[in-house]
Image (cartoon, rainbow, N blue to C red):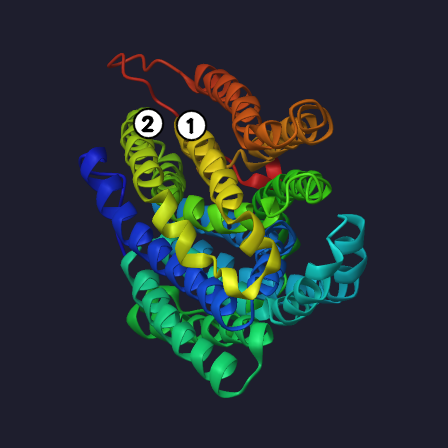
Amino acid sequence: MKDLTKGNPFKLILLFALPVFLGCIFQQLYNMTDTFIVGHTVGADALTGVGSTGAVTFLVLGFVNGVTTGFGVKISQCYGAGDGEGMRRAIGLSLVLGGGLTVLLTAVAVPCTGPLLRLMGTPAQYFEYARSYLLVIFSGIVSSMLYNLGANILRAVGDSKTPLFFLVAAALLNVGLDFAFILGCKLHYHGAALATVVSQLLSGLACFIYMFKRYPALRVSRADLKWDFRLAWGLLAVGLPMALQFSITAIGSIFQQTALNGLDSAYPGAVTAYVAASKIDAFATQTFVAVGAAMATYVGQNTGAGEFGRVKRGILVGMVYSAASAVLGFAFCYGLCNPLMRLFLKTETSETLQLYFDDVLGYGKQFLLVQSGCYLLLGVIYVFRNALQGMGKSGVAMFAGVTELAGRALTAFVFVRIWEYTGFCFSNAVAWLFADLFLVSVFLIVTHRRRKPSSSSGRTVVPASPPPAAR
Protein backbone atom coordinates (compact mmCIF):
# COMPACT_ATOMS: atom_id res chain seq x y z
CA MET A 1 0.00 0.00 0.00
CA LYS A 2 1.19 3.55 -0.73
CA ASP A 3 0.50 6.80 1.14
CA LEU A 4 0.13 9.65 -1.39
CA THR A 5 -0.38 12.35 1.23
CA LYS A 6 3.36 12.89 1.70
CA GLY A 7 6.16 13.49 -0.79
CA ASN A 8 6.71 15.22 -4.12
CA PRO A 9 3.48 15.20 -6.21
CA PHE A 10 5.46 15.04 -9.48
CA LYS A 11 7.17 11.84 -8.41
CA LEU A 12 4.17 10.29 -6.65
CA ILE A 13 1.76 10.81 -9.55
CA LEU A 14 4.29 9.62 -12.11
CA LEU A 15 5.20 6.47 -10.17
CA PHE A 16 1.52 5.69 -9.61
CA ALA A 17 0.52 6.37 -13.22
CA LEU A 18 3.30 4.35 -14.88
CA PRO A 19 2.03 0.88 -13.88
CA VAL A 20 -1.52 1.94 -14.79
CA PHE A 21 -0.26 3.12 -18.18
CA LEU A 22 1.59 -0.13 -18.84
CA GLY A 23 -1.52 -2.08 -17.87
CA CYS A 24 -3.64 0.01 -20.23
CA ILE A 25 -1.15 -0.57 -23.04
CA PHE A 26 -1.30 -4.32 -22.53
CA GLN A 27 -5.08 -4.16 -22.47
CA GLN A 28 -5.11 -2.27 -25.75
CA LEU A 29 -2.59 -4.68 -27.23
CA TYR A 30 -4.82 -7.66 -26.62
CA ASN A 31 -7.85 -5.70 -27.85
CA MET A 32 -5.91 -4.95 -31.02
CA THR A 33 -4.94 -8.61 -31.23
CA ASP A 34 -8.63 -9.54 -31.13
CA THR A 35 -9.31 -7.13 -33.96
CA PHE A 36 -6.30 -8.26 -35.98
CA ILE A 37 -7.14 -11.96 -35.71
CA VAL A 38 -10.83 -11.42 -36.49
CA GLY A 39 -10.00 -9.19 -39.45
CA HIS A 40 -7.50 -11.62 -40.93
CA THR A 41 -9.32 -14.90 -40.26
CA VAL A 42 -13.04 -14.13 -40.45
CA GLY A 43 -13.03 -11.06 -42.67
CA ALA A 44 -13.33 -7.28 -42.83
CA ASP A 45 -17.10 -7.36 -42.31
CA ALA A 46 -16.63 -9.31 -39.08
CA LEU A 47 -13.94 -6.83 -38.00
CA THR A 48 -16.29 -3.93 -38.67
CA GLY A 49 -19.21 -5.64 -36.94
CA VAL A 50 -17.19 -6.47 -33.83
CA GLY A 51 -15.44 -3.09 -33.84
CA SER A 52 -18.66 -1.12 -34.23
CA THR A 53 -19.88 -2.45 -30.88
CA GLY A 54 -17.49 -0.21 -28.97
CA ALA A 55 -20.08 2.40 -28.00
CA VAL A 56 -22.60 -0.22 -26.87
CA THR A 57 -19.96 -2.13 -24.92
CA PHE A 58 -18.85 1.07 -23.24
CA LEU A 59 -22.46 1.83 -22.30
CA VAL A 60 -22.53 -1.25 -20.04
CA LEU A 61 -18.91 -2.00 -19.16
CA GLY A 62 -18.22 1.71 -18.73
CA PHE A 63 -20.94 1.66 -16.08
CA VAL A 64 -19.09 -1.21 -14.37
CA ASN A 65 -15.80 0.66 -14.53
CA GLY A 66 -17.38 3.84 -13.23
CA VAL A 67 -19.19 2.32 -10.27
CA THR A 68 -16.15 0.33 -9.14
CA THR A 69 -13.94 3.41 -9.51
CA GLY A 70 -16.41 5.25 -7.30
CA PHE A 71 -16.22 2.53 -4.67
CA GLY A 72 -12.44 2.88 -4.86
CA VAL A 73 -12.67 6.63 -4.20
CA LYS A 74 -14.59 6.01 -0.98
CA ILE A 75 -12.05 3.35 0.05
CA SER A 76 -9.14 5.71 -0.72
CA GLN A 77 -10.70 8.41 1.48
CA CYS A 78 -10.98 5.94 4.38
CA TYR A 79 -7.37 4.90 3.83
CA GLY A 80 -6.17 8.51 3.69
CA ALA A 81 -8.05 9.26 6.92
CA GLY A 82 -6.49 6.21 8.66
CA ASP A 83 -9.88 4.54 9.17
CA GLY A 84 -9.00 0.85 8.77
CA GLU A 85 -12.32 -0.48 10.04
CA GLY A 86 -14.29 1.82 7.77
CA MET A 87 -12.09 0.78 4.84
CA ARG A 88 -12.77 -2.94 5.37
CA ARG A 89 -16.50 -2.33 5.75
CA ALA A 90 -16.44 -0.31 2.52
CA ILE A 91 -14.64 -3.16 0.73
CA GLY A 92 -17.11 -5.74 2.04
CA LEU A 93 -20.17 -3.78 1.03
CA SER A 94 -18.58 -3.01 -2.35
CA LEU A 95 -18.51 -6.76 -2.96
CA VAL A 96 -22.18 -7.07 -2.03
CA LEU A 97 -23.23 -4.12 -4.19
CA GLY A 98 -21.05 -5.31 -7.07
CA GLY A 99 -22.76 -8.70 -7.05
CA GLY A 100 -26.22 -7.17 -7.11
CA LEU A 101 -25.35 -4.76 -9.91
CA THR A 102 -23.85 -7.61 -11.96
CA VAL A 103 -27.13 -9.54 -11.88
CA LEU A 104 -29.14 -6.44 -12.77
CA LEU A 105 -26.90 -5.33 -15.63
CA THR A 106 -26.77 -8.81 -17.18
CA ALA A 107 -30.56 -9.15 -17.02
CA VAL A 108 -31.01 -5.82 -18.82
CA ALA A 109 -28.11 -5.84 -21.31
CA VAL A 110 -28.50 -9.30 -22.87
CA PRO A 111 -32.10 -8.97 -24.13
CA CYS A 112 -31.62 -5.34 -25.23
CA THR A 113 -28.61 -6.00 -27.46
CA GLY A 114 -30.42 -6.69 -30.75
CA PRO A 115 -33.02 -3.90 -30.45
CA LEU A 116 -30.31 -1.34 -29.62
CA LEU A 117 -28.21 -2.30 -32.64
CA ARG A 118 -31.28 -1.96 -34.87
CA LEU A 119 -32.07 1.42 -33.36
CA MET A 120 -28.53 2.51 -34.23
CA GLY A 121 -29.09 1.59 -37.87
CA THR A 122 -26.28 -0.97 -37.92
CA PRO A 123 -25.76 -1.98 -41.59
CA ALA A 124 -27.15 -5.43 -42.37
CA GLN A 125 -23.79 -6.93 -43.38
CA TYR A 126 -22.36 -6.15 -39.92
CA PHE A 127 -25.43 -6.75 -37.73
CA GLU A 128 -25.11 -10.43 -36.85
CA TYR A 129 -21.40 -10.15 -36.13
CA ALA A 130 -22.08 -7.28 -33.71
CA ARG A 131 -25.08 -8.92 -32.01
CA SER A 132 -23.39 -12.28 -31.42
CA TYR A 133 -20.22 -10.67 -30.10
CA LEU A 134 -22.14 -8.49 -27.64
CA LEU A 135 -24.24 -11.38 -26.34
CA VAL A 136 -21.09 -13.19 -25.23
CA ILE A 137 -19.52 -10.06 -23.72
CA PHE A 138 -22.66 -9.11 -21.79
CA SER A 139 -23.17 -12.64 -20.54
CA GLY A 140 -19.75 -12.29 -18.90
CA ILE A 141 -20.30 -8.94 -17.14
CA VAL A 142 -19.34 -10.69 -13.89
CA SER A 143 -15.74 -10.98 -15.11
CA SER A 144 -15.48 -7.26 -15.77
CA MET A 145 -17.05 -6.42 -12.40
CA LEU A 146 -14.68 -8.75 -10.56
CA TYR A 147 -11.48 -7.47 -12.16
CA ASN A 148 -12.38 -3.77 -12.00
CA LEU A 149 -13.45 -3.99 -8.38
CA GLY A 150 -10.25 -5.77 -7.34
CA ALA A 151 -8.03 -3.40 -9.33
CA ASN A 152 -9.73 -0.27 -8.00
CA ILE A 153 -9.50 -1.46 -4.38
CA LEU A 154 -5.76 -1.98 -4.78
CA ARG A 155 -5.30 1.38 -6.49
CA ALA A 156 -7.32 3.06 -3.75
CA VAL A 157 -4.64 2.08 -1.21
CA GLY A 158 -1.82 3.18 -3.50
CA ASP A 159 -0.91 -0.15 -5.13
CA SER A 160 -1.05 0.39 -8.88
CA LYS A 161 1.59 -2.25 -9.66
CA THR A 162 -0.33 -5.39 -8.73
CA PRO A 163 -3.27 -4.69 -11.09
CA LEU A 164 -0.66 -4.27 -13.83
CA PHE A 165 0.79 -7.73 -13.23
CA PHE A 166 -2.61 -9.37 -13.40
CA LEU A 167 -3.61 -7.35 -16.44
CA VAL A 168 -0.42 -8.43 -18.24
CA ALA A 169 -1.22 -12.03 -17.37
CA ALA A 170 -4.78 -11.54 -18.63
CA ALA A 171 -3.47 -10.00 -21.87
CA LEU A 172 -1.14 -12.90 -22.56
CA LEU A 173 -3.86 -15.41 -21.70
CA ASN A 174 -6.32 -13.55 -23.91
CA VAL A 175 -4.00 -13.73 -26.90
CA GLY A 176 -3.46 -17.45 -26.35
CA LEU A 177 -7.19 -18.07 -26.00
CA ASP A 178 -7.83 -16.01 -29.15
CA PHE A 179 -5.77 -18.43 -31.18
CA ALA A 180 -7.22 -21.44 -29.37
CA PHE A 181 -10.87 -20.40 -29.68
CA ILE A 182 -10.81 -18.63 -33.07
CA LEU A 183 -8.41 -20.86 -34.98
CA GLY A 184 -8.34 -24.08 -32.97
CA CYS A 185 -12.00 -24.43 -31.97
CA LYS A 186 -13.31 -22.54 -35.05
CA LEU A 187 -15.44 -20.24 -32.89
CA HIS A 188 -14.50 -17.25 -35.09
CA TYR A 189 -15.64 -13.87 -33.72
CA HIS A 190 -17.48 -15.60 -30.86
CA GLY A 191 -14.09 -16.89 -29.79
CA ALA A 192 -12.68 -13.36 -29.50
CA ALA A 193 -15.45 -12.40 -27.08
CA LEU A 194 -15.14 -15.63 -25.08
CA ALA A 195 -11.37 -15.22 -24.78
CA THR A 196 -11.87 -11.72 -23.34
CA VAL A 197 -14.44 -12.89 -20.78
CA VAL A 198 -12.44 -15.94 -19.60
CA SER A 199 -9.11 -14.12 -19.31
CA GLN A 200 -10.64 -11.23 -17.37
CA LEU A 201 -12.51 -13.58 -15.04
CA LEU A 202 -9.33 -15.48 -14.13
CA SER A 203 -7.42 -12.22 -13.70
CA GLY A 204 -10.10 -10.86 -11.36
CA LEU A 205 -10.10 -13.99 -9.21
CA ALA A 206 -6.30 -13.94 -8.97
CA CYS A 207 -6.38 -10.25 -8.04
CA PHE A 208 -8.64 -10.86 -5.05
CA ILE A 209 -6.72 -13.95 -3.89
CA TYR A 210 -3.46 -12.00 -3.95
CA MET A 211 -4.99 -8.92 -2.32
CA PHE A 212 -6.40 -10.75 0.68
CA LYS A 213 -3.21 -12.77 1.13
CA ARG A 214 -0.76 -9.91 0.67
CA TYR A 215 -2.58 -7.19 2.63
CA PRO A 216 -4.14 -8.41 5.91
CA ALA A 217 -5.58 -4.92 6.47
CA LEU A 218 -7.84 -5.44 3.44
CA ARG A 219 -9.25 -8.79 4.51
CA VAL A 220 -12.99 -8.63 5.10
CA SER A 221 -14.88 -10.69 7.63
CA ARG A 222 -18.49 -11.85 7.58
CA ALA A 223 -19.39 -8.81 9.69
CA ASP A 224 -17.96 -6.53 6.97
CA LEU A 225 -20.43 -8.04 4.48
CA LYS A 226 -23.39 -7.14 6.68
CA TRP A 227 -25.81 -4.69 5.09
CA ASP A 228 -25.39 -1.10 6.25
CA PHE A 229 -27.81 1.29 4.56
CA ARG A 230 -25.82 4.42 5.39
CA LEU A 231 -22.54 3.00 4.10
CA ALA A 232 -24.24 1.50 1.04
CA TRP A 233 -25.73 4.88 0.23
CA GLY A 234 -22.34 6.50 0.74
CA LEU A 235 -20.73 4.10 -1.74
CA LEU A 236 -23.53 4.46 -4.28
CA ALA A 237 -23.55 8.24 -3.87
CA VAL A 238 -20.00 8.23 -5.24
CA GLY A 239 -20.14 5.19 -7.52
CA LEU A 240 -23.46 5.64 -9.34
CA PRO A 241 -22.80 9.19 -10.60
CA MET A 242 -19.42 8.03 -11.90
CA ALA A 243 -21.07 5.04 -13.55
CA LEU A 244 -23.79 7.18 -15.07
CA GLN A 245 -21.15 9.62 -16.28
CA PHE A 246 -19.51 6.82 -18.29
CA SER A 247 -22.86 5.60 -19.58
CA ILE A 248 -23.99 9.10 -20.55
CA THR A 249 -20.73 9.53 -22.46
CA ALA A 250 -21.42 6.19 -24.13
CA ILE A 251 -24.87 7.37 -25.22
CA GLY A 252 -23.13 10.25 -26.97
CA SER A 253 -20.84 7.74 -28.67
CA ILE A 254 -23.91 5.77 -29.75
CA PHE A 255 -25.22 8.95 -31.38
CA GLN A 256 -21.89 9.24 -33.18
CA GLN A 257 -21.95 5.63 -34.35
CA THR A 258 -25.55 6.02 -35.53
CA ALA A 259 -24.61 9.11 -37.53
CA LEU A 260 -21.63 7.31 -39.05
CA ASN A 261 -23.76 4.27 -39.94
CA GLY A 262 -25.97 6.65 -41.89
CA LEU A 263 -22.95 7.77 -43.96
CA ASP A 264 -22.04 4.20 -44.95
CA SER A 265 -23.61 4.38 -48.43
CA ALA A 266 -22.23 7.84 -49.26
CA TYR A 267 -18.77 7.02 -47.88
CA PRO A 268 -18.19 3.30 -48.53
CA GLY A 269 -15.75 1.88 -46.02
CA ALA A 270 -16.02 4.82 -43.59
CA VAL A 271 -17.34 2.58 -40.80
CA THR A 272 -14.48 0.13 -41.31
CA ALA A 273 -11.99 3.03 -41.36
CA TYR A 274 -13.38 4.37 -38.09
CA VAL A 275 -13.16 0.94 -36.42
CA ALA A 276 -9.49 0.59 -37.35
CA ALA A 277 -8.64 4.23 -36.56
CA SER A 278 -10.40 4.09 -33.18
CA LYS A 279 -8.14 1.19 -32.15
CA ILE A 280 -5.10 3.34 -32.90
CA ASP A 281 -6.68 6.31 -31.12
CA ALA A 282 -7.43 4.19 -28.04
CA PHE A 283 -3.79 3.11 -27.93
CA ALA A 284 -2.57 6.73 -28.15
CA THR A 285 -4.82 8.01 -25.34
CA GLN A 286 -3.88 5.56 -22.60
CA THR A 287 -1.49 8.08 -21.04
CA PHE A 288 -4.52 10.22 -20.19
CA VAL A 289 -6.28 7.23 -18.66
CA ALA A 290 -3.25 6.55 -16.46
CA VAL A 291 -2.94 10.18 -15.35
CA GLY A 292 -6.66 10.22 -14.57
CA ALA A 293 -6.41 7.08 -12.42
CA ALA A 294 -3.48 8.61 -10.53
CA MET A 295 -5.40 11.85 -9.99
CA ALA A 296 -8.46 10.07 -8.54
CA THR A 297 -6.40 8.18 -5.94
CA TYR A 298 -4.03 11.07 -5.19
CA VAL A 299 -6.85 13.54 -4.68
CA GLY A 300 -8.96 10.98 -2.79
CA GLN A 301 -6.24 10.25 -0.25
CA ASN A 302 -5.29 13.91 0.20
CA THR A 303 -8.92 14.96 0.53
CA GLY A 304 -9.42 12.29 3.19
CA ALA A 305 -6.34 13.63 5.01
CA GLY A 306 -7.49 17.27 4.69
CA GLU A 307 -4.44 18.20 2.56
CA PHE A 308 -6.20 20.41 0.05
CA GLY A 309 -3.09 22.44 -0.78
CA ARG A 310 -1.54 19.23 -2.11
CA VAL A 311 -4.67 18.64 -4.19
CA LYS A 312 -4.12 21.90 -6.08
CA ARG A 313 -0.46 21.10 -6.64
CA GLY A 314 -1.50 17.71 -7.95
CA ILE A 315 -3.78 19.39 -10.51
CA LEU A 316 -0.84 21.36 -11.90
CA VAL A 317 1.25 18.20 -12.10
CA GLY A 318 -1.55 16.37 -13.88
CA MET A 319 -1.85 19.13 -16.49
CA VAL A 320 1.91 19.07 -17.15
CA TYR A 321 1.76 15.32 -17.78
CA SER A 322 -1.37 15.73 -19.92
CA ALA A 323 0.27 18.36 -22.12
CA ALA A 324 3.25 16.06 -22.68
CA SER A 325 0.87 13.20 -23.44
CA ALA A 326 -0.97 15.30 -26.03
CA VAL A 327 2.25 16.00 -27.92
CA LEU A 328 3.33 12.35 -27.84
CA GLY A 329 -0.15 11.16 -28.87
CA PHE A 330 -0.23 13.42 -31.92
CA ALA A 331 3.25 12.32 -32.97
CA PHE A 332 2.22 8.66 -32.61
CA CYS A 333 -0.93 9.03 -34.71
CA TYR A 334 0.72 11.21 -37.37
CA GLY A 335 3.73 8.97 -37.79
CA LEU A 336 2.10 5.52 -37.60
CA CYS A 337 -1.38 6.07 -39.01
CA ASN A 338 -0.93 4.42 -42.41
CA PRO A 339 1.10 1.35 -41.38
CA LEU A 340 -1.20 0.61 -38.43
CA MET A 341 -4.34 1.08 -40.54
CA ARG A 342 -2.95 -1.37 -43.11
CA LEU A 343 -2.27 -3.85 -40.29
CA PHE A 344 -6.00 -4.20 -39.60
CA LEU A 345 -7.32 -4.15 -43.16
CA LYS A 346 -7.14 -7.22 -45.37
CA THR A 347 -8.49 -6.42 -48.82
CA GLU A 348 -8.99 -10.06 -49.84
CA THR A 349 -11.81 -10.44 -47.29
CA SER A 350 -13.99 -7.53 -48.42
CA GLU A 351 -15.20 -6.31 -51.79
CA THR A 352 -15.62 -2.81 -50.34
CA LEU A 353 -11.98 -2.71 -49.29
CA GLN A 354 -10.86 -3.96 -52.69
CA LEU A 355 -12.73 -1.14 -54.43
CA TYR A 356 -12.16 1.71 -51.96
CA PHE A 357 -8.97 0.84 -50.07
CA ASP A 358 -7.26 4.22 -50.60
CA ASP A 359 -10.44 6.04 -49.57
CA VAL A 360 -10.68 3.93 -46.41
CA LEU A 361 -7.09 4.84 -45.50
CA GLY A 362 -7.91 8.48 -46.13
CA TYR A 363 -10.97 8.38 -43.89
CA GLY A 364 -8.96 6.80 -41.10
CA LYS A 365 -6.11 9.30 -41.39
CA GLN A 366 -8.48 12.27 -41.42
CA PHE A 367 -10.20 11.08 -38.25
CA LEU A 368 -6.92 10.41 -36.43
CA LEU A 369 -5.29 13.73 -37.30
CA VAL A 370 -8.30 15.75 -36.16
CA GLN A 371 -8.68 13.62 -33.04
CA SER A 372 -5.03 13.69 -32.00
CA GLY A 373 -4.71 17.41 -32.74
CA CYS A 374 -7.24 18.02 -29.95
CA TYR A 375 -5.81 15.62 -27.35
CA LEU A 376 -5.06 18.39 -24.86
CA LEU A 377 -8.82 18.93 -24.52
CA LEU A 378 -9.11 15.28 -23.54
CA GLY A 379 -6.28 15.65 -21.04
CA VAL A 380 -8.13 18.46 -19.27
CA ILE A 381 -11.15 16.16 -18.84
CA TYR A 382 -9.15 13.37 -17.22
CA VAL A 383 -7.34 15.69 -14.81
CA PHE A 384 -10.26 17.79 -13.59
CA ARG A 385 -12.99 15.14 -13.74
CA ASN A 386 -10.96 12.59 -11.81
CA ALA A 387 -9.85 15.24 -9.32
CA LEU A 388 -13.49 16.13 -8.63
CA GLN A 389 -14.29 12.45 -8.26
CA GLY A 390 -11.42 12.02 -5.80
CA MET A 391 -12.90 14.90 -3.78
CA GLY A 392 -16.18 13.00 -3.60
CA LYS A 393 -17.88 15.29 -6.12
CA SER A 394 -18.82 12.50 -8.50
CA GLY A 395 -22.36 13.87 -8.82
CA VAL A 396 -20.91 17.09 -10.20
CA ALA A 397 -18.48 15.21 -12.43
CA MET A 398 -21.43 13.25 -13.84
CA PHE A 399 -22.76 16.41 -15.42
CA ALA A 400 -19.54 16.64 -17.42
CA GLY A 401 -20.83 13.51 -19.15
CA VAL A 402 -24.05 15.38 -19.89
CA THR A 403 -22.08 18.20 -21.50
CA GLU A 404 -20.15 15.65 -23.57
CA LEU A 405 -23.46 14.12 -24.59
CA ALA A 406 -24.70 17.55 -25.68
CA GLY A 407 -21.56 18.05 -27.77
CA ARG A 408 -21.84 14.67 -29.46
CA ALA A 409 -25.58 15.15 -30.07
CA LEU A 410 -24.81 18.51 -31.71
CA THR A 411 -22.26 16.95 -34.05
CA ALA A 412 -24.38 13.85 -34.77
CA PHE A 413 -27.57 15.71 -35.57
CA VAL A 414 -26.19 19.00 -36.94
CA PHE A 415 -22.51 18.86 -37.96
CA VAL A 416 -22.77 15.50 -39.73
CA ARG A 417 -25.80 16.70 -41.68
CA ILE A 418 -23.93 19.80 -42.85
CA TRP A 419 -20.32 18.64 -43.21
CA GLU A 420 -20.90 14.87 -43.39
CA TYR A 421 -17.76 12.85 -42.60
CA THR A 422 -15.67 15.93 -41.74
CA GLY A 423 -18.32 16.90 -39.20
CA PHE A 424 -18.09 13.42 -37.72
CA CYS A 425 -14.31 13.75 -37.33
CA PHE A 426 -14.76 16.84 -35.14
CA SER A 427 -17.43 15.23 -32.95
CA ASN A 428 -15.14 14.20 -30.09
CA ALA A 429 -13.29 17.53 -30.04
CA VAL A 430 -16.57 19.45 -29.67
CA ALA A 431 -17.72 17.11 -26.88
CA TRP A 432 -14.39 17.48 -25.05
CA LEU A 433 -14.56 21.28 -25.27
CA PHE A 434 -18.06 21.34 -23.80
CA ALA A 435 -16.94 19.13 -20.89
CA ASP A 436 -13.75 21.16 -20.30
CA LEU A 437 -15.63 24.44 -19.91
CA PHE A 438 -17.94 22.84 -17.36
CA LEU A 439 -15.30 20.93 -15.36
CA VAL A 440 -12.80 23.77 -15.00
CA SER A 441 -15.55 26.20 -13.98
CA VAL A 442 -16.89 23.80 -11.34
CA PHE A 443 -13.43 23.01 -10.00
CA LEU A 444 -12.66 26.72 -9.54
CA ILE A 445 -15.94 27.18 -7.68
CA VAL A 446 -15.31 24.16 -5.43
CA THR A 447 -11.75 25.20 -4.58
CA HIS A 448 -12.86 28.76 -3.84
CA ARG A 449 -15.53 27.54 -1.41
CA ARG A 450 -13.12 25.18 0.35
CA ARG A 451 -10.44 27.79 0.93
CA LYS A 452 -10.36 28.63 4.65
CA PRO A 453 -7.38 30.58 6.01
CA SER A 454 -5.82 29.33 9.24
CA SER A 455 -5.69 31.88 12.07
CA SER A 456 -2.25 30.72 13.19
CA SER A 457 -0.19 30.28 10.06
CA GLY A 458 -2.05 31.76 7.12
CA ARG A 459 -1.95 28.34 5.53
CA THR A 460 -5.05 27.07 3.77
CA VAL A 461 -6.74 24.47 5.94
CA VAL A 462 -9.47 22.23 4.59
CA PRO A 463 -11.31 19.63 6.64
CA ALA A 464 -11.67 16.09 5.42
CA SER A 465 -14.70 15.46 3.21
CA PRO A 466 -17.89 14.56 5.05
CA PRO A 467 -19.40 11.16 4.32
CA PRO A 468 -21.01 11.13 0.85
CA ALA A 469 -24.34 10.20 2.44
CA ALA A 470 -24.42 13.55 4.21
CA ARG A 471 -24.07 15.56 1.05
Q: Residue at x 80, y 49 (%)?
A: 119
Q: Secondary structure at mark 1?
A: helix
Farthest-out residue, front: 355
Residue 153 visible? The answer is: no
**Quadrant in the picture for residue 267:** top right
Residue 203 visible? The answer is: yes
Left or right: residue 208 compared with residue 128: left
Residue beneath label 1, please?
Answer: 380
Left or right: residue 288 compared with residue 399: left
Q: Position of residue 250 (x, y in %)?
A: 63, 44
Disc 1 to disc 2: CB gap under 8 Å: yes
Residue beneath label 2, please?
Answer: 319
Left or right: residue 218 compared with residue 89: left
If the image is split into quadrants, where does the C terminus sit?
top right
Q: Position of residue 400 (x, y in %)?
A: 58, 30
Q: Position of residue 7 (x, y in %)?
A: 18, 37
Q: Residue at x 47, y 46 (%)?
A: 277
Q: Residue at x 60, y 65 (%)?
A: 46
Between 417 and 91, the one nearer to me in the picture: 417
Q: Residues within 10 Å of mark 2 (few under 14, many from 20)?
A: some
Give how far apart the Cα atoms at labels 1 and 2 are: 7 Å
Residue type at mark 2: give it: Met
Q: Residues within 10 Å of mark 1 (few under 14, many from 20)?
A: many
Q: Secondary structure at mark 2?
A: helix
The first of marks 1 and 2 along the sequence is 2
If the image is split into quadrants, where does the N terminus sit?
bottom left
Residue 404's disc is: none
Residue type at mark 1: give it: Val
